[in-house]
């Protein structure tokens, strides 16, 4: 779900700005603001190109595929007895899954951070800062909180206990209980933050694009459309295909297509 949240948030920003064509027409040729704070210290002297947008999309899309793959690998390893939460042994799968997952989510958030840094002025009317940090905190808190609890478990700060029925429980079970309890509290705070980050009034009073037709749908059809992975698959094919020769941008307010050079 966290992977889908990052991808959906980037897609929302694209929609705010009128699509890839509009974004590229605004950014193309502008110098990159080199800064360690923005994560662009190694891009001094570079300019924004279509490759920049492709990287941002690729960075978020890879997490959408790595996350479910990791989930299936965890299920397989658990069934074989080679995966235990908090087991940092090189003979187990927890260490390697944690490394892969951490690298993947960090790359996805880095791509999102780069995109927001480049389009900061364009997105200013939509106040993306609170939206960005709200989404980012929900994802990072749950992951790093689990890692921190696993470290505490390994350091024997979290000890096994005996439940109310006199049945002994492992330290891993206790750690998982702490994680679930903390997530329940944090999701309440996240729900309040999301209420202010994504107010309904913005969408209720937003000016409709005359070139787009909007039709009212039922809740079930809207939910089905939201969970449809077709957009992710199309974007993945569009951005990762090795034989893709031309990156064609579509603008929501022009009838022509804007072709850009091969990367």
Image (tube, rainbow, N blue to C red):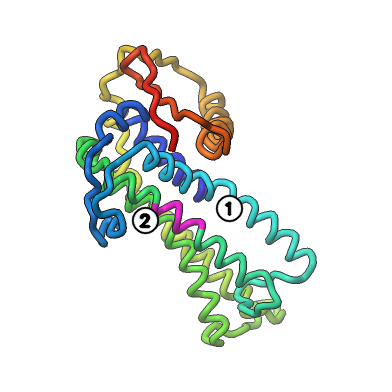
In the rendered structure, the answer to whether residue 42 lies left or right of residue 150 reads left
Where residue 196 appears, as percent x and y from the top left, is 29, 44
- The residue drawn where x is 45% and y is 39% is 8
**Considering depth in this image, is 222 or 139 the residue closer to the camera?**
139
| Closer mark to the observer between disc 2 and disc 1 | 1
In the drawing, does residue 203 fall left or right of residue 103? left
**Quadrant that contains the C terminus:** top left
Q: Is residue 33 magenta?
A: no
75 in relation to 9, above or below: below
Residue at the location (55% across, 67% down)?
A: 99
Residue that badge 2 annotates: 189
Residue 124 place in picture, x, y as percent: 21, 39
Mark 2 touching mark 1, by CB under 8 A? no
Placement of 113 over or under 262, stated as above or below: below
Q: Is residue 228 visible?
A: no
Point 57% across, 62% down: residue? 100
Please state the horizontal and vertical placement of residue 93, each as a whole percent of the image.
67, 69
Instruction: Say which element carries label 2.
Output: helix
Does the segment drawn in magenta span residue 106?
A: yes
Task: Evaluate whether residue 35 shows in this view.
Answer: yes
Instruction: List x then y, in percent, for residue 249.
Output: 40, 25
Q: Which residues are magenta?
A: 104-110
Q: Secondary structure at mark 1?
A: helix
What residue is at 47 percent from the left and 68 percent from the top? 145
Is residue 136 or residue 203 the one in the foreground?
A: 136
Residue nearest the observer in this picture, 74 or 111: 111
N-terminal of the pair, mark 2 or mark 1, is 1
Residue on which disc 1 sits? 67
In the picture, the disc for residue 30 is none
């Amino acid at each position: 779900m966290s992977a889908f949240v990052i991808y959906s948030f980037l897609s929302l920003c694209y929609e705010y700005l009128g699509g890839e064509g509009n974004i590229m027409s605004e950014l193309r040729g502008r110098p990159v603001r080199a800064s360690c704070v923005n994560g662009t210290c190694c891009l001094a002297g570079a300019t924004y190109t279509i490759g920049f947008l492709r990287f941002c999309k690729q960075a978020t899309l890879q997490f959408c595929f790595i996350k479910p793959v990791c989930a299936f690998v965890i299920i397989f390893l658990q069934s074989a007895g080679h995966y235990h939460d908090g087991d940092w042994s090189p003979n187990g799968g927890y260490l390697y899954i944690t490394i892969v997952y951490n690298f993947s989510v960090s790359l996805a958030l880095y791509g999102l951070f780069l995109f927001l840094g480049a389009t900061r002025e364009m997105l200013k009317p939509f106040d993306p800062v609170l939206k960005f940090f709200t989404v980012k905190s929900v994802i990072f808190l749950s992951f790093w909180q689990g890692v921190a609890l696993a470290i505490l478990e390994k350091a024997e700060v979290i000890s096994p206990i005996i439940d109310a029925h006199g049945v002994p429980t492992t330290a891993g079970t206790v750690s998982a209980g702490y994680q679930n309890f903390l997530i329940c509290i944090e999701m309440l705070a996240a729900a309040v933050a999301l209420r202010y980050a994504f107010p309904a009034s913005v969408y209720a009073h937003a000016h409709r694009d005359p070139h787009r037709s909007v039709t009212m749908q039922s809740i079930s059809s809207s939910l089905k459309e939201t969970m449809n992975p077709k957009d992710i698959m199309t974007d993945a094919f569009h951005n990762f295909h090795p034989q893709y020769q031309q990156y064609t941008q579509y603008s929501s307010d022009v009838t022509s297509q804007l072709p850009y050079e091969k990367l």
